[in-house]
Image: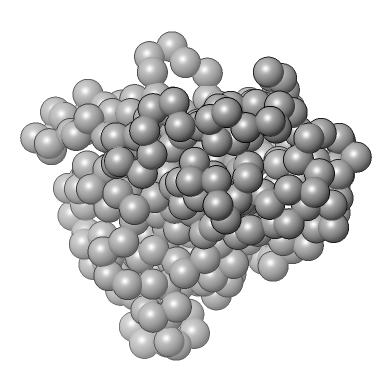
């Protein structure tokens, strides 16, 4: 099994659904109504939090973090899951979100398109752990596919064209193995990490697939999408962490408040606020680590290597 450490990073989350999609909530352009002069996507009492689509259980999984932000800021937090990664990019460029959980790839595409965003940090899942998570290449148990090079001619599940660990870095791995990710395989866009792993485990729509490590090794099993041992990992690549971001269009005092609220945030801080912390949340979150925009230069480099159109909005 190959281990490739292209860069270090970690993913927090890719989606929470409470109120429909970004597309549904964003009928009008940013700046309409009272929020225009205030710099908020909706109003001064509300933080609109955009989330990329991902796992089916993330609403419950990451609710503790949302409750913490609401408790510390005194604002209502409206969680909006985007229909796809591209929709979140478009919404952020249009100023329709105040904070969000992005993939590294989505953050780069959004800022390339003019979105005024700044990362508040990325998470680590264990004490003393370096920021970083892994993009896994998986096959069904008993598959004859043993390496990236063996994927040629097969049906392969990706997450979404805008996913860091589910498309961009896998594309780089395929190209490095001499495989064109559009011509030499049959790509299947599953729509989420959980769906990519599940379809691969079933071995019908996809004979191999890409998904983040937490889904393959923890949450997919816990959610009953597949059983432990149904998937075999044939490749691992470390990718940069998915950032929690804020809009720099927000009033300066709100930006400062969010930076203070999220700085060095730990699981213990959330529990101390009297918020119930689930085992599912603990599997993803131990501490938030601050990062600069330059942390995502490695994503920009892979964008250049792959020539991925999704790197631009």
Residue nearest the viewer, comparing 56 with 33 = 56
> Relative to 141, is 250 on the left or the right?
left
Is residue 253 at all visible to an observer of this figure?
no
Q: Position of residue 12 (x, y in %)?
A: 43, 39
| Quadrant hosting residue 252 | bottom left
Q: What is the residue that sits farthest to the left in this orientation? A: 274
Q: Position of residue 218 (x, y in %)?
A: 37, 30
Tell me which residue sits at (57%, 55%) in the image. Answer: 205
Using the rendered view, name the quadrant where residue 254 is placed.
bottom left
Q: Name the foreground residue: 15 vs 140.
A: 140
The part of the image, by quadrant, that contains residue 313 is: bottom right
User: Residue 61 at what x, y percent from top left?
Assistant: 27, 43
Q: Residue sitting at 55 percent across and 75 percent down? A: 94
Q: Please tell me whether residue 223 is drawn above or below residue 27 in the rendered image.
A: above
Front-lying residue, 112 or 163: 163
Q: Residue furthest top?
A: 128
Q: Residue at x 80, y 58 (%)?
A: 182
Which of the two residues, 120 or 142, is positioned nearer the viewer here? 142
Q: Position of residue 82 (x, y in %)?
A: 45, 66
Left or right: 161 as drawn, with respect to 227: right
Determine whether 180 is above or below 241 in the image.
Answer: below
The residue under the point 38% across, 39% down is 226
Q: Quadrant of the N terminus?
A: top right
């Amino acid at each position: 099994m190959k281990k490739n450490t292209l860069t270090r990073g970690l993913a927090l989350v890719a989606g929470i659904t409470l109120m429909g999609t970004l597309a549904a909530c964003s009928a009008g352009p940013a700046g309409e109504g009272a929020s225009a002069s205030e710099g908020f996507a909706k109003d001064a009492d509300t933080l609109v939090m955009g989330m990329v689509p991902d796992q089916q259980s993330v609403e419950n999984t990451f609710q503790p973090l949302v409750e913490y932000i609401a408790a510390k800021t005194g604002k209502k937090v409206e969680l909006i899951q985007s229909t796809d990664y591209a929709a979140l990019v478009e919404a952020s460029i249009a100023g329709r979100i105040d904070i969000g959980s992005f993939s590294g790839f989505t953050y780069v595409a959004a800022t390339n398109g003019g979105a005024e965003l700044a990362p508040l940090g990325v998470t680590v899942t264990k004490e003393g752990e370096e920021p970083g998570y892994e993009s896994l290449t998986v096959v069904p148990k008993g598959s004859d596919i043993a390496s990236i090079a063996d994927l040629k001619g097969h049906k392969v599940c990706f997450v979404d064209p805008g996913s860091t660990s589910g498309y961009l870095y896998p594309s780089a791995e395929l190209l490095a193995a001499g495989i064109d990710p559009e011509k030499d395989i049959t790509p299947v866009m599953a729509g989420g990490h959980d769906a990519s792993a599940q379809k691969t485990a079933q071995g019908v729509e996809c004979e191999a697939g890409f998904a983040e490590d937490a889904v393959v090794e923890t949450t997919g099993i816990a959610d009953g999408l597949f059983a432990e041992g149904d998937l075999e990992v044939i490749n691992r690549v470390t990718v940069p962490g998915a950032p929690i971001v804020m809009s720099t269009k927000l009033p300066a005092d709100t930006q400062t408040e969010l930076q203070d609220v999220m700085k060095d945030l730990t699981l213990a801080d959330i529990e101390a606020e009297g918020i119930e912390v689930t085992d599912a949340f603990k599997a993803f979150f131990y501490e938030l680590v601050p990062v600069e925009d330059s942390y995502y230069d490695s994503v920009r480099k892979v964008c250049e290597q792959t020539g991925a159109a999704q790197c631009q909005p």
